[in-house]
Amino acid sequence: MKKGLKIALIVIGVLIGIITLDTLQAKIFDNSPLLKIRDNLDGETLDYIDKGIFVNHYHCTNNEKVTTWKGTKFSCSVKEISLNDINDKIINFVSNQEEDNTNYAYNYIDTEKQVIVVGLVDNNENNQDEFIKKVFSSCCGSEYIHYIKNNNLIEFNESKDVFEAKIIVAEKDYITVEVLKDSNSLKKDDKVTMKITRPTDGTNDFYVVGNKVRITFNGNILYSNPAQIGAIKIELI
């Protein structure tokens, strides 16, 4: 046998051995093959696919790792997430006083529709996406987010009321007003109290008894005497 042909056969044999060992270690241990091309970084249920010569290695967003033979179909499994779990995580998030939840109004489980109903003051698609991302990114990750969106498990409603009133009590950190016109949540002559933050330098401080104001709030009312709300915006009119 010629020396050149012998060397070529040895090189081919070594390559076949490397490929075989690489394929076996990937398949037996569900590892990524060393000889691969990484593809399909879609970020939903699948992080990436490492495409080897004879096998494909799938890495899912839930950290599931599976190596299959070429031509074998595979889909990442998705853990079923309960409505109670989703609702509890929303409650935990909005209870965190460090978070800005001024656009949030309420959430509850609608057992008939099998969805979580969330009320937002400004209910648009961007705010809906932002709410889901803020709530579930820190605690749960992309698997949760995609599962919720793909299964339409959260239904958003607009929860906002605006009314006109006259200030009848003005203290350092709160005001009490008398409603001037009926609104969705309040009737004329109702008395309502809310916390305020006065300007530190006193400029444009219109919290004065007798001034008329337009108040925007999220529709939630604590029925005490007088009733209490959390104002989102107070404007002088």
Image: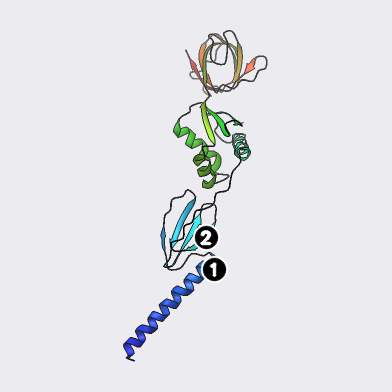
Badge 1 is on which residue?
28
Q: Nearer the viewer, residue 127 or 64?
A: 64
Residue 191 falls in which quadrant of the image?
A: top right
On screen, residue 60 versus residue 224, left or right, reads left
Q: Nearer the viewer, residue 95 or 174?
A: 95
Q: Is residue 231 visible?
A: yes
Mark 1 residue element: helix
Residue 140's place in the image compared with 13, above or below, is above
Sequence order check: which comes first, mark 2 or mark 1? 1
On screen, residue 49 versus residue 173, left or right, reads left
Q: Please give the name of the residue rendered at 33% of the width and 86% of the height, measured from the top-left corner.
A: 5
Residue 5's place in the image compared with 25, above or below, is below
The x, y position of residue 155, in whole percent, is 53, 32
Q: Please give the name of the residue rendered at 48% of the width and 74% of the height, measured from the top-left corner.
A: 21
Q: Nearer the viewer, residue 30 or 73?
A: 73
Whether tag 2 and tag 1 are in contact, CB under 8 A, the answer is no
Q: Is residue 102 visible?
A: no
Amino acid type assigned to the residue bearing label 1 in the image: Ile
Residue at mark 2 to residue at mark 1: CA–CA distance: 10 Å
Mark 2 residue element: strand
Amino acid type assigned to the residue bearing label 2 in the image: Val
The x, y position of residue 236, in whole percent, is 48, 15
Disc 2 crowd rating (10 Å Cα; few below 14, some 14-19, many 20+) is many
Badge 2 is on which residue?
66
The x, y position of residue 78, in whole percent, is 55, 49
The N terminus - image quarter:
bottom left
